[in-house]
Image (spheres, rainbow, N blue to C red):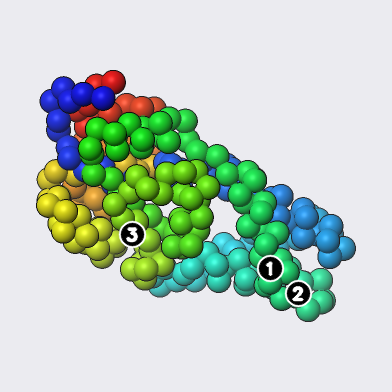
Amino acid sequence: MTDTERRYDAVFWDIGGVIVELASVREGYAAFLAELADEYDLDPEPTRERWKAALGEHFRAGEGTEYRTASEGYRVATEAVFEAAGRDAPPESEWRPILDRCSNATLRTEPGAVETIRALDEAGVYQAVISDVDAAEAESMFSQLGIDEHFAHVTTSEAVGYKKPDRRMFETALSKAAEHGIDPEQGVMVGDRYGHDIEGASALGLSAIAYGEDAAGEAADHVITDLRGIAEVVGIDG
């Protein structure tokens, strides 16, 4: 990789919908619920519907940008399934390994994500993550994908206590980046949600790359439909 005209020295990534394909996450949930229903003799369709509804209720119950962990959501949703069936839920030590195994088995990345992350790292571009995710889930996904070593740091909503576009998410990440000599104007955020990623980053002085038309808007400095286009935006040639 060689520089053409380097525009940015740092790239901040979202995870869901940018690095990790969201459909693969949903497929993991579906596989878990199918196995859960089979293992505990539950009706599959009500199991799926109750679990999804309870998980959604868990996340929506947070006030403002308060973050409610996915781990707690999985526990609440699984307990709701057994409660609806008039039964006591098994301990988490029994069902959580099924969820983890199913999620790992279906995990896929967005096209070009891993390739681009490795290319930027090779070119010496500072990379970090700002994502509404549990810390353990981010660590597990990155380890499985073999990309954990490419990020200087990972800022999660679990650690900060808030979700994007709360400025505390971006302030935390930028504070860590400043320790490496990175200022906001040197960085660009890659996100798939306009209000959360693009406007949130722009408000803190970061440039923003909208991944997909749904993320495009006035605050987006660049719009791409292929993550391999990040190299050109940053100012790097293959």
Which marked residue is nearer to the observer: mark 1 or mark 2?
Answer: 2
| Residue that carries the numbered disc 3 in the rendered image | 155
Structural distance between the alpha carbons of marks 2 and 3:
33 Å
Which is more N-terminal, label 3 or label 2?
Answer: 2
Q: Give the residue at x 73% y 56%.
A: 33
What label does residue 130 carry, if any? none
Q: Are marks 2 and 3 in contact (CB under 8 Å)?
A: no
Q: Are marks 1 and 2 in contact (CB under 8 Å)?
A: no
Of the 4 image quadrants, the one containing the C terminus is top left
| Residue that carries the numbered disc 2 in the rendered image | 90
| Residue that carries the numbered disc 1 in the rendered image | 78
Amino acid type of the residue that numbered disc 2 sits on in the rendered structure: Pro
Amino acid type of the residue that numbered disc 3 sits on in the rendered structure: Thr
Q: Position of residue 58 (x, y in %)?
A: 55, 69
237 to the left or right of 32: left
Q: Give the residue at x 47% y 69%.
A: 68
The image quarter containing residue 227 is: top left
Residue 237 in view, yes or no: yes
Which is more N-terminal, label 2 or label 1?
Answer: 1
Q: Position of residue 8 (x, y in %)?
A: 17, 37
**How packed is label 1: few (under 14 Cα within 10 Å), some, or many (20 or more)?**
many
Q: Position of residue 32 (x, y in %)?
A: 71, 55
Say which element carries label 3.
strand
Structural distance between the alpha carbons of marks 1 and 3:
27 Å
Amino acid type of the residue that numbered disc 1 sits on in the rendered structure: Thr
Q: Nearer the viewer, residue 90 or 62?
A: 90
Q: Residue furthest right?
A: 41
Structural distance between the alpha carbons of marks 1 and 2:
9 Å
